[in-house]
Image (tube, rainbow, N blue to C red):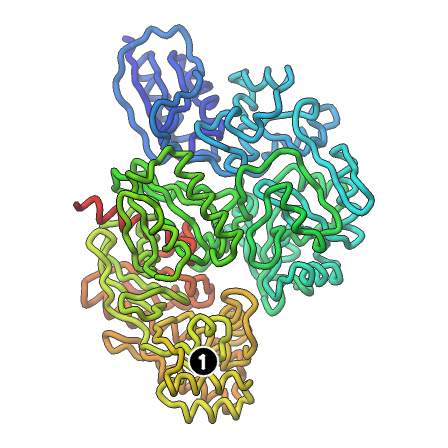
Amino acid sequence: MKVAQRILIYGVVQGVGFRPFVFRKAKRWKLSGWVRNGESGVEIHVEGDADAIQQFVQDITDRYPSSAKIINLEIKNAPVQEAADFEILASTLHNRPTVQIPADLAVCPKCLSELFDPANRRFLYPYINCTDCGPRYTVIERLPYDRPYTTMHMWSMCPACSAEYYDPVDRRFHAQPTACPDCGPHYHVQGQDGEIHGDEKAIKKTAELLRSGRIVTIKGLGGYLLACDAENEEAVWELRRRKRRGEKPFALMVKDLETAKSFIDICSEEENLLTSSARPIVLAQARRLLPGVAPDNSDLGVMLPYTPLHHLLFHFDAPEVLVMTSANRSSEPIIYDDEAIKALEGIADAWLIGERPIARRVDDSVVRVSPFGPTVLRGARGYAPLPAAQLPSDWPVLAVGADLKNTITLVVNGQAIMSQHLGDLMKYEAYMSFEQTVHDLLSMYDVRLQETIVAYDLHPDYQSTAFAHNLEAYQHIGIQHHRAHVASVLAERNALDKRVIGVAFDGTGFGDDGAIWGGELFVGSAAEGLKRRGHLRYAMLPGGDAAARMPLQALAGFFVDDSKWAINVGKQLSFPERFFTAVKMVEKQLRTFPTTSVGRLFDAAAALLGFTGPISFEGQAAIWLEHLARTAPLEKVYSFPWNGKELDYRPFLKEMTEDRLKGKDAAVIARAFHRSVAEGIFRSVRSLGAAYEIDTVVLSGGVFQNSLLLADLKELFYESDMHIWIGEEVPPNDGGISLGQAALVAAAHSNL
């Protein structure tokens, strides 16, 4: 007996070859009906034998394309339409779209094979792609994801491409960016020698320039990248000078996996990340260091080629390891507009320019394998827009995040969509990118502000907060920074009702009492609320935000109870005059602010052990301290007492300082510092867990990007009965704040 069912599949199911996949499965099980893209996902009407339909449903949910992600599935009985065959229908657009936008994908093995096959009509064509690979988010202008709504709309397909595009059994069926040399975009290079057109000639010339030590701007998926030979020390330092990069590490692109293994230690998890379709930058322990690439850093950030263009550069003998860094001046967002490359005059020697426009800027993603598993530190190309969570909100929610490492999250019909990394909003171009992304997502999902709840950080001076207040929204809700850190992990795990001990350690966040928080312990859940039950003992920050840029100032603030001893220590260690000025500021309470920041405690420890200059990028002192600590064995643990409400750093700091004055090896002290922080966390969490009968701890905030600290915590908690949760695809740093804001608003709103 023939029956019919209507199936709605939610998740990342458009732009990833899902409809042709469904078509093939329907044919396999001899079913009739149709499949189409809808506003919320993929809609399927299928009719035939009941057992065959059951097998079909199991087939499409168990073995779907690797680039897809099914979040939810709805199946309902439907009237039989007596369909003669199974077909793919045009997309529908009647209501607000809620479908997840697909992320950009690395070029697949089949396309690579065609790229280097002289008999193939796409031989050496740098824009080759199919339904399994290529650009998605960076070419989509609006939903649904169809070619007329992408940046490829200006290129009409030739008969051969059109035949593939409309053939349901072809690999390029409805591959929206598909093209070939006869009908698609091309590359050209321009520089001091004029312009060279023709894909092969332009790419060969670029490889030649890179071999000769030149700096070249290369158009990628989500923006322009600056490239040079990473093993040419002169070229690397020249790029650092021109870009005004300071000491922040450069990312590397290597020719292949074997080359990667010669530069970094790679475990199986790191290999899986490197070769995944997201192709992120993977941070790992360096096997050999490259001068100028990562000063004072024992890690390297390495990625494999992810576009056909990259593979062609290496094919035409570009250096096997390239610096590949965002094309911008220091701290500004990546340049993605062809007109904006004029801003790179004086930095680049030449420009390799592609004709296909980029719809929005998207950086490379950064991940690392922590002791608790893979963790995304910067979610961008290949990950964004991330289908981050299912949240219980019937109202749209727009969460605008924090000002550092900003992301935004939009909740539509309970689906939380998290943007790419947008940068630090005090930079004008980053702020403009932030505004554009907000309006971009609202427009793409047809969300009206008048019916939207806007969530923002409580910091009164944040650019994102001011922006939120100026939106004519249904409601505005402020969310405390560190509660948002904890809630981001709960949201990712779909555990808003789970009672946890939340540990939020970072550099800066506006506290309930107006102080600068950053060492917080919470008890509760996202649904019931997170109550502050402990914190680092208050120190002082002389100069406020300036102390985050000068670790010596942070150190002075932790000597708040004994300025005379601080001055004596400073003299014995020959600290610069800035330290003594900061001590006097603390003593006289001039422009000095209370803080519980563990991030600043790390800075203070770094200053005590020799990092006495200013930082040139966020987290530099703490990273320096971690890498110093990795070089020494664990010989002792300092006192870091927990009294039920506070972690008291004073005994800790006194013992460290005494060791430093005695001439103990700075690396040994740094190692002891990390273990002492871990033991302080362990004792305080165990105490709170016992008091409130809670067995799960959430670790979030930028401090928990520290792999050595996490390794110590894993060891300490190994034999305990407590479970540790950290962010996985949602960054532990401020990149996760927007999801946490959205989760806390959704949880509270669902209880109204």
Q: Is residue 493 rendered to the left or right of residue 437?
A: left
Which residue extends farthest left?
752
Quick check: 712 left or right of 345?
left
> Residue shown at 64%/51% (left/top)?
324
Relative vertical location of residue 584 with respect to residue 97 in this rendering, above or below:
below
Q: SS at mark 1?
A: helix
Q: Quadrant of the N terminus?
A: top left
Residue type at mark 1? Leu
Mark 1: few, some, or many residues within 10 Å (few <14, many ≥20)?
A: many
Q: Quadrant of residue 284?
A: bottom right
Q: Position of residue 661 (x, y in %)?
A: 50, 90
Where does residue 174 sit, x and y in percent of width and height?
Answer: 52, 22
Residue 165 image position (x, y, % from top left): 56, 19
- Would residue 31 appear left or right of 342 to someone viewing this image? left
How far across and down, in percent of the image, does residue 682 sit? 32, 70
| Camera-side residue of 244 and 731 | 244
Quick one: quadrant of the C terminus? top left
Count of numbered circles in the view: 1
Residue at 70% x, 56% y: name it: 230
Residue occupied by mark 1: 555
Between 391 and 133, the one lying in front of the other is 391
86 relative to 390, above or below: above
